[in-house]
Image (cartoon, rainbow, N blue to C red):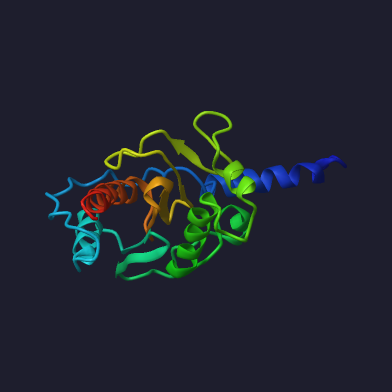
Amino acid sequence: MSNKNDFRRWPAVLFAWAFAACGDGGGAGGKGPAPLPVPQAPAAGTLGDGRLKVLLDWARNSQQLPAMAVIVIRRGQVAEKAAVGLRSAANENVLAVTPAGFVHVTLDDFAAYLQAHLAGGRGASGLLTTDSWHTLHAEILKPYALGWEVFSSLPLLSVAGFGHNGSNNRWFAVTWVAPSLDTAAFIVTNGGGERAEAAIAAFDQQLRSRIAASP
């Protein structure tokens, strides 16, 4: 016989099931197959040299991922963007985890989001007050701000910044912002697990070298 209070447990049970089955919508990309050896990278080059897709394809193929995409914001404008491979419409979670990671946006939509953060940080955005933007970006509990991880020095760029990564175990994305360079980037793949992390980490290293070498 069921207890009259059993219904109170259902939200927790459903949440636990969704969490275990589908991931929590944040953090790293999960486990999955072990990463493959990453082949030697092509030359990083510089922004605007027409070779962004070559680097993106190198990273995607290194871990046998379906697709990858990137967009780079610099000095308020889209400096570069590219996408390679094929999107798999099946790479989604069940609707129960919608609040944790079922928002769909285009690269251009996300570019507008990053542009707003960069502009707000220098007091040029009308979406929020300058103080509100600074509050969002300020470290509260080391190393975290409100929704961001704060870095005293972004690797290869050697400037302070903030960023975030997230996964639903079927997609994996990384974004970071370097206010002093007026630069931000968003990298995403429709694959999860350690291979997705490895591909994005390898590409991000080349991308940062590319940005550092650009005027």
**Residue 65, position in %: x, y?**
29, 59
Task: Name the one closer to the observer, 169 or 81.
Answer: 81
Q: Quadrant of the N terminus?
A: top right
Relative side of 158 to 27, left or right:
left
Relative side of 83 to 7, left or right:
left
Q: How many labels does the image show?
A: 0
**Residue appearing at x 48%, y 60% in the figure:** 115
Q: Is residue 111 above or below residue 17?
A: below
The picture quadrant where one finds residue 45 is: bottom left
**Residue 191, position in %: x, y?**
37, 57
From this viewpoint, which residue is outermost toward the front? 123
Relative side of 59 to 126, left or right:
left
Q: In this view, does 127 lie above or below 83?
A: above
Task: Name the one closer to the observer, 34 or 152.
Answer: 152
From this viewpoint, which residue is outermost toward the top? 142
The picture quadrant where one finds residue 81 is: bottom left
**Residue 16, position in %: x, y?**
62, 43
From this viewpoint, which residue is outermost toward the right? 4
Relative side of 24 to 55, left or right:
right
**Residue appearing at x 43%, y 56% in the figure:** 170
**Residue 114, position in %: x, y?**
48, 58
**Residue appearing at x 63%, y 45% in the figure:** 131
Task: Name the one closer to the observer, 136 or 193.
Answer: 136
Task: Name the one closer to the observer, 112 or 91.
Answer: 112
